[in-house]
Amino acid sequence: MEELHADRRRAESFGAASDDYDRYRPRYPRALIADLITAAGLATLDVGAGTGIASVQLIRAGATVLAVEPDSRMAGVAAGKGVTVEIATFEDWQPGSRTFDLVVFAQSFHWVQPRPALAKVRGILNPGGRLALLSNRIVPKAPTWADLDDIYSDYLGDERSSIVDATRLAEVTALIEDGGFTVDNRNVVEQLHYTTEDWLNLVFTYSNHLTLPAAARDELRGRLAERIGPHGVDAVNDALAVICTPG
């Protein structure tokens, strides 16, 4: 698995765009969330909760949620939506005697050191508890990434792969199984259409876009808008829940 957790420049880039992140990042398909909530009041920990996108959905589905988020600006947005948040990295966060029925990493597992994180999860799960890694995996189909790659190569180089695409499922599965979990993958596919403006608003919440210098970011956005044109972007979200049970 690409060790994005070591790139703190990217990991810590989201707070400055917390409002845009909350506005433009997609919500998870309801069916994916519903699969996780096996009982009302399920004690749930949302790790790397960001602005509370998954937390709010889990609460609405009936869970009792505690969020852990290292960035105070992101945590502030989540708290403003009624989410209980503790500000810390997962590595530094202290659970005390608290345990959970469900631990969720929603688009955030790539920002932690995986092996220590898995060991910590095992220590805080109640008997019968589960770990779930959630990902919205949005891929443009018209135009495709390949149609835009010559533009991106001028700005992002080896960082062209977006956060959405960074987690390699086979490698993640092997790591999790190595940590003593069994894995069950569930997915929901959505057909999407974005206006050009909405697509650009989304991709410019990804860390490889956020960390560009302002002038380069503006120039990249302009070139992408011109290439995409008035039709916008047809895309597919192959949303994934990697549901893990301790062996």
Image (cartoon, helix red, strand yellow):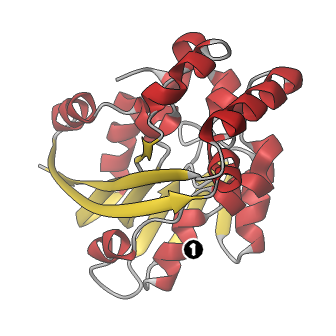
> Image quarter for residue 219?
top right
Task: Pinpoint residue 212: horizontal percent, then vertical percent.
Answer: 76, 23
Rendered view: 192 above or below 84:
above
Mark 1 Cα shell of 10 Å, populated few (<14), some (14-19), many (≥20): some
Residue found at the very far right of the displayed protein: 215
Q: Is residue 11 visible?
A: no
Residue at 65% over, 44% down: 229
- Residue carrying label 1: 56
For residue 242, above or below residue 97: above
Residue 192 position within the rendered picture, expressed as x and y whole percent measured from the top left = 45, 61
* Residue 25 shows up from this direction: yes
Q: Which of 150 and 58 lies nearest the eye of the viewer?
A: 150
Q: Position of residue 76 (x, y in %)?
A: 79, 60
Q: Amino acid at mark 1?
A: Val
Residue at 60% from the left image edge and 56% from the top image edge: 25
Q: Identify the residue at image location x=21%, y=37%.
A: 173
Where disc 1 sits, the SS reads: helix
Instruction: Report the quarter where the N terminus lies.
Output: top left
Q: Nearer the viewer, residue 98 or 119?
A: 119
Q: Position of residue 211 (x, y in %)?
A: 74, 26
The one of 218 and 104 positioned closer to us in this rendering: 218
Q: Quadrant of residue 28?
A: bottom left
Q: Residue at x 20, y 32 (%)?
A: 170
Vertical placement of residue 102 versus 64, above or below: above
